[in-house]
Image: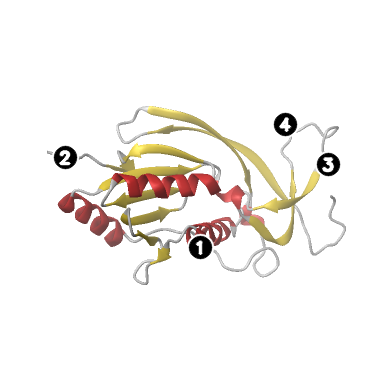
């Protein structure tokens, strides 16, 4: 769909390639993303608020400290292409990168999903994830909006900590942690890392003994 209105100016996009490493510097995967040049967006016309779900450092320390002291299970889940799960709320157009053949698709297209690089992508993803976690029964903390608590009469309590597309799932019982991971994976495409080894640049080491 092409933009005919001057109020809807298209922004450029490009492919960004990266190699992801773990906390020990070992390569874990290759990554390629189509990223929009969000710096060309205009406030109030192309976007309103800009924020992303990032927990406070104090919340991370407390959760890990409690888990270590009480022997909780702490697992790590990564949401694949997280921002693309959210729909864009404003009419927005993008120019496709030069490597896309114009014969197969329009050079200028309307954006339907929260593409990486757009100013509102983090906020829209945060709203989407909050909705999905609420539907599985998780309640947001009043202390930190990135911390959720999920309670079950059999599987006990499980805490979910979100940091953009990374989720820490910590609970008193492994069955509870597994139940939460199954519920999340039923709604979103995720990569289950298992026990946490690194989180937002921090290396996590644990000795259960």
- Which sits in the foreground, 129 or 73? 73
Which dot marks residue 208?
A: 2
Residue annotated with mark 4: 99
Residue annotated with mark 1: 51
* Colouring style: secondary structure
Query: Which numbered disc, 3 or 2, marks the residue that appears first in the sequence?
Result: 3
Query: Which numbered disc, 4 or 2, marks the residue that appears first in the sequence?
Result: 4
**In the image, farthest residue toward the bottom:** 142
Answer with left or right where residue 157 lies relative to residue 77.
Answer: left
Categorize mark 3 by other alpha carbons within 10 Å: few (<14), some (14-19), many (20+): some
Answer with left or right where residue 56 lies relative to residue 183.
Answer: left
Q: Residue at x 36, y 49 (%)?
A: 168
Residue 101: quadrant of the picture: top right
Q: Residue at x 33, y 30 (%)?
A: 25
Q: Secondary structure at mark 2?
A: loop
For residue 204, above or below residue 132: above
For residue 43, above or below residue 34: below
- Which percent across, then down, holds residue 206? 20, 40
């Amino acid at each position: 769909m092409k933009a005919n209105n001057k109020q809807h100016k298209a922004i450029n996009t490009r492919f960004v390639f990266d190699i992801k490493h773990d906390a020990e510097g070992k390569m874990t995967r290759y990554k390629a993303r189509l990223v929009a040049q969000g710096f060309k967006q205009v406030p109030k016309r192309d976007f309103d608020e800009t924020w992303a779900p990032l927990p406070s450092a104090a919340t991370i320390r407390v959760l890990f400290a409690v888990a270590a002291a009480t022997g909780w299970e702490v697992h790590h889940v990564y949401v694949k292409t997280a921002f693309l799960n959210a729909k864009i709320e404003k009419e927005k157009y993008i120019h496709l990168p030069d490597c896309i053949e114009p014969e197969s698709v329009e050079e200028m297209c309307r954006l339907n999903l929260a593409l990486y690089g757009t100013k509102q992508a983090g906020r829209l993803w945060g709203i989407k994830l909050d909705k999905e976690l609420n539907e599985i029964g998780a309640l947001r903390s009043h202390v930190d909006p990135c911390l959720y608590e999920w309670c079950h009469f059999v599987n006990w309590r499980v805490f979910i900590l979100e940091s953009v597309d990374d989720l820490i799932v910590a609970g008193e019982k492994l069955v509870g942690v597994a139940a939460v991971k199954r519920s999340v994976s039923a709604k979103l495409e995720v990569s289950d890392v298992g026990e946490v080894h690194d989180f937002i640049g921090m290396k996590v080491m644990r000795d259960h003994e």
